[in-house]
Image: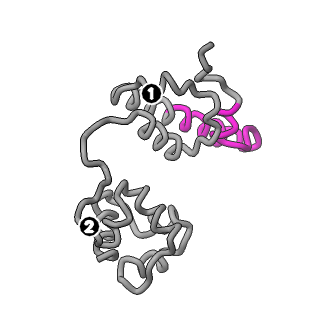
Amino acid sequence: MFSKRLKYLRIEKKLTQQAMADFLGISRQGYGKYEDGKSEPDHDTLIKLSSFFKVTTDYLLGNTDVPSTKTDNSFNAIDEINQLLKKYNIDQSGFFDIEKWKAMGPEGVKQLDSYFKFLTEQAEKENKDNPLKNKGGFKKKLNGLNYFKKSS
């Protein structure tokens, strides 16, 4: 069941086996074995896959047919923002005002996603234009900026 669900989820997201292998840090052949049922991922990889596809590990393993742990359609801004922080590889979250994050609605999170994307693209462009400058990439650029100051 795991191999079928993994393949289904990958195809649904229009990703290649190579893209998934790169995400997991393994060879394409190693990933292919997961989808062929010839190998199973370790615990950490299983969790990484479930987070990536936003499904439960029980769903991946075939223990349930319910892909998500969410049973209602309630919006949780903090969960959504944490996903964005992971998506854009931001690990310096100490400059965020948590109360403002909690008050955000879905539209605010979409705007934040666009903003993070913009910052990432700008940092990548700067690194391409001058590879000797900004060796830290997006993290270094973002850490040097105070976009989200805590309120007093």
Tell me, yes or no, if residue 19 can be seen here.
no
Q: With 91 as the anchor, is 98 left or right in this view? A: left
Instruction: Relative to 12, say whether 83 is above or below.
Output: above
Q: Of callouts 1 and 2, which one flags the residue occurring earlier in the amino acid sequence? A: 2
Secondary structure category for the residue under label 1: helix
* Along the viewing direction, whichever of 18 and 102 lies nearer the viewer: 102
Which dot marks residue 102? Answer: 1
Residue 124 colored magenta? Answer: yes
The residue singled out by tag 2 in the image is 64
Task: Identify the residue at the far bottom of this view.
Answer: 38
Instruction: Relative to 140, say whether 43 is above or below.
Output: below
Q: Three-letter amino acid code at disc 2?
A: Thr
Secondary structure mostly taken by the magenta-highlighted segment of the chain: helix
Q: Three-letter amino acid code at disc 1?
A: Lys
User: Residue 29: x percent and y percent?
Assistant: 47, 80
- 3D distance between C-alphas at marks 1 and 2: 31 Å
Tell me, yes or no, if residue 113 can be seen here.
yes
Q: Which residues are magenta?
A: 118-143
Q: Are marks 1 and 2 in contact (CB under 8 Å)?
A: no
Q: Quadrant of residue 50?
A: bottom left
At x 44%, y 83%, the residue is: 39
Q: Quadrant of residue 146?
A: top right
Residue 64 colored magenta? Answer: no
Instruction: Relative to 27, say whether 52 is above or below.
Output: above
* Along the viewing direction, whichever of 19 and 108 lies nearer the viewer: 108
Secondary structure category for the residue under label 2: loop
